[in-house]
Image: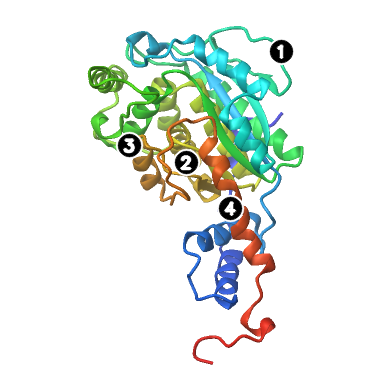
Amino acid sequence: MTSLGETLGAVRPVEPGPMAEARAHQDRLTKPSGSLGVLEDVAVRLAGIAGACPPPLPAPAALAIFAADHGVHAQGVSPWPQEVTAQMVANFAAGGAVANAFAAQVGASVTVVDVGVAADLAPADGLLVRKVAYGTADLSQGPAMTRDQATAALTAGVEVARDLVAAGARCLVTGDMGIANTTASAALICAFTGREAAGVTGRGTGVDDATYQHKIEIVRRGLRVNGIAEAEAVPGGPDAALRVLAAVGGLEHAAIAGFVIGAAAARVPVILDGVIAGASALAACALAPDTVGYCLAGHRSAEPGHAVALTHLGLEPLVDLRLRLGEGTGGLLAHPLVSAAVRVMHEVATFDSAGVADKGD
């Protein structure tokens, strides 16, 4: 079994040579230079990830939905009962969720990973039990996880990524499930970006104005009791990143961070979903900065913290449909766009090969 440290050490920068080659190839294709906008940037990034131009098609894709519960739910930050986490895991396993429908549309496999659901789950096809704990502690009262728990969840995510790639996946998609996990996400985004709680905390699955203000105060309290200054980014480095992740993150955040790092170590692109994935990617990139080169932003969530996280990471979202569901839905919707960007590199003729005059010819 590869240790977390070995996986972190295996993450290398994307390769600039193939990226330059891909950019030059884009300019020779039968279209105005730059006319495909962000899709050209996607193709260039994938060339750097693969170390080849043109890059391979990012298919088949594999979605991993990491599920866990949160002690901060006791503070009344969500109108949904905590039992919904376990119930939705069963729904994923039965194929009845939106993520399942979107995965079927794009031909992606679905793996559900219990890293911290506050219940024992019945065995099901596609369900992996990698439970670290029965949910986190209440982040507003102290650390949500111990350092060992956060490390175990990170390792679980790394191993899921490794196994999916070994089984043939050529693109990974992040998914999540956990009632109250937008509260932990807001705290993580505050800590890693230095933004204030009010600017990154959203309404999650839908809360009224009073509950929303209470949620912001809970995020502030979580930062304060864990010794994290609001509006001041934590110092860099893996030790600080792990401390923050354990203090205010969720078990699924840690597992998704490990999943993203595992994808980077395997030199496979990973499409990030919404705000939970964005918060997790901040942790992953704080642990291993070169990881960001392997990330694609599937969409921009309606949650305000997600835009903050993407800006901090320097990632351009592929779609903006005001989604706020999670599960991996936005990442799955973006996968055909990622594939289309690569198909252009493989299938579109150059000006020379097609006998088409370039500008200035």
Mark 2: amino acid: Cys
Q: Nearer the viewer, residue 314 or 88?
A: 88
Q: Are marks 1 and 4 in contact (CB under 8 Å)?
A: no
- For disc 1, the neighbor class at 10 Å (few under 14, some 14 to 19, many from 20) is few
Where is residue 16 shown, x and y percent of the image? 56, 63
Residue 278: assigned label:
none
Indicate the colouring scheme: rainbow
Residue behind mark 1: 123
State the CA–CA distance, disc 1 to disc 3: 36 Å
* Residue mark closest to the camera, 1 vs 2: 1
Q: Earlier in the sequence, mark 2 or mark 3?
A: 2
Indicate which label's residue lies in the foreground, 4 or 2. 4
Which is more toward the observer, 45 or 355? 355
Residue named by callout 2: 285
Question: Counting residues from the N terminus, which is met first, the one under dot 1 or under dot 2?
Answer: 1
**What residue appears at the point 52 percent right and 51 percent down from the top-left corner?**
293
Give the residue at mark 4: 338
- Whether label 4 touches label 2, CB < 8 Å: no
Alpha-carbon distance for marks 2 and 3?
A: 20 Å
Q: Around disc 3, counting alpha carbons within 10 Å, would you say few (fewer than 14), some (14 to 19), or many (20 or more)?
A: some
Q: Earlier in the sequence, mark 4 or mark 2?
A: 2
Q: Is residue 48 above or below residue 355?
A: above
